Amino acid sequence: MRYALITGGSRGIGKAISLRLADEYPILINYKSNRAAAETTLSAIESKGGKAELLPFDVADGSAADAALTQWQDAHPEDTISVLVNNAGIRIDTMMVFMQASQWHSVLDTTLNGFFYVTRRLLKDMLMNRSGRIINISSISGLKGQPGQTNYSAAKAALIGASKALALEVAARKVTVNVIAPGFIETDMTEGLDEQSIKKLIPAGRFGTAEEVAALAAFLASDNAAYITGEVISINGGLYT
Ligand code: NAP
């Protein structure tokens, strides 16, 4: 069977992508620590007739990612992971003048190094099978920069550069690599922001939903998107084009 792995699949955008891709694939729900949320996502998939498994590991820890994926592959010798959504991400916002090295590194370790560890581990099988979809969740902050987010903007911009390079490396083997760059989406990550003020800046007049991002991810994962690679697709209600 061909599985889809969604990093940070327990909550928010990753949860919505897990639920949406469960219409087509058995799902591996990765998360770091919130087991209760991951189990809720798993139950939601099962109650709509889908199949899913939990696969917890810290994407920022290369050895942990390798160990978890090796263990999964040993237990599933007939199966393969053909869709990878690198969605796990955190933000620790502060002006650079106040930023601690640990705040810089945590954000880059999760978004950028996480992408590297998990993708490198799964890429060989995708290339051998001549089939794969890699979808990386960046951000409007990686396109235009955001004050208070030098760490996050750096990580999300680097993810775009890496995706474009990787897309060229693997295109001949029918593996596509694309980036989704969301604007403001209603999740735990945006909770506490001043939604009323921010909404005034968004031409569509509202935050997006995780389900809207998931619909785009499902398209990019589908056969219909076979000729799209190395692209960055914004989903931001017109906030930045
Ligand atoms: P969220 O609600 O905070 O969920 C984050 C998810 O990532 C959780 O499942 C969390 O797992 C997981 N995670 C965090 N660190 C991890 C790690 N080291 N290893 C494995 N899993 C980890 O965030 P979200 O809003 O859905 O954001 C998802 C992605 O979209 C992120 O990359 C974010 O930067 C990007 N994005 C979001 C927005 C927005 O407006 N929400 C806009 C642009 C881009 P636990 O449950 O175990 O903590």
Image (cartoon, helix red, strand yellow):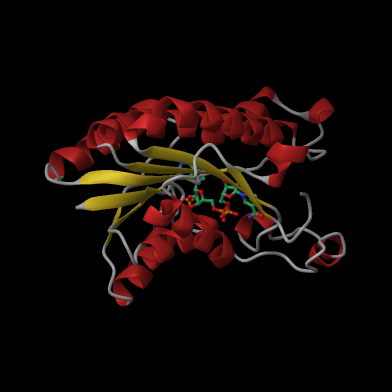
Q: Please indicate, yes or no, whether residue 64 appears anywhere in the rendered image.
A: no
Q: Position of residue 1 (x, y in %)?
A: 19, 53
Q: Nearer the viewer, residue 130 or 212?
A: 130
The residue at 79%/55% (across/down) is 239
Residue at the image point whose x is 78% and y is 67% from the top? 204
Residue 49, percent from left and from top: 28, 74
Q: Is residue 115 visible?
A: yes
Name the image quarter holding residue 70.
top left
The spot of residue 98 in percent (x, y) is 81, 29
Q: Is residue 205 above or below residue 166?
A: below
Q: Is residue 129 above or below residue 44?
A: above
Q: Is 232 placed above or below 64 here?
A: below
Where residue 175 appears, as percent x and y from the top left, is 37, 38
Numbered circles on residues, count: 0
Q: Residue at (82%, 38%) from the top-left corner?
A: 147
At 41% across and 32% down in the image, what residue appears? 171
Relative horizontal placement of residue 50, taking residue 188 as reference (left or right):
left
Q: Is residue 141 left or right of residue 31?
A: right
Residue nearer the viewer, 112 or 192: 112
Q: 157 and 106: which one is in front?
A: 157
Name which quarter of the figure residue 53 lies in: bottom left
Q: Nearer the viewer, residue 228 or 144?
A: 228
Locate residue 209: give its quadrant: bottom right
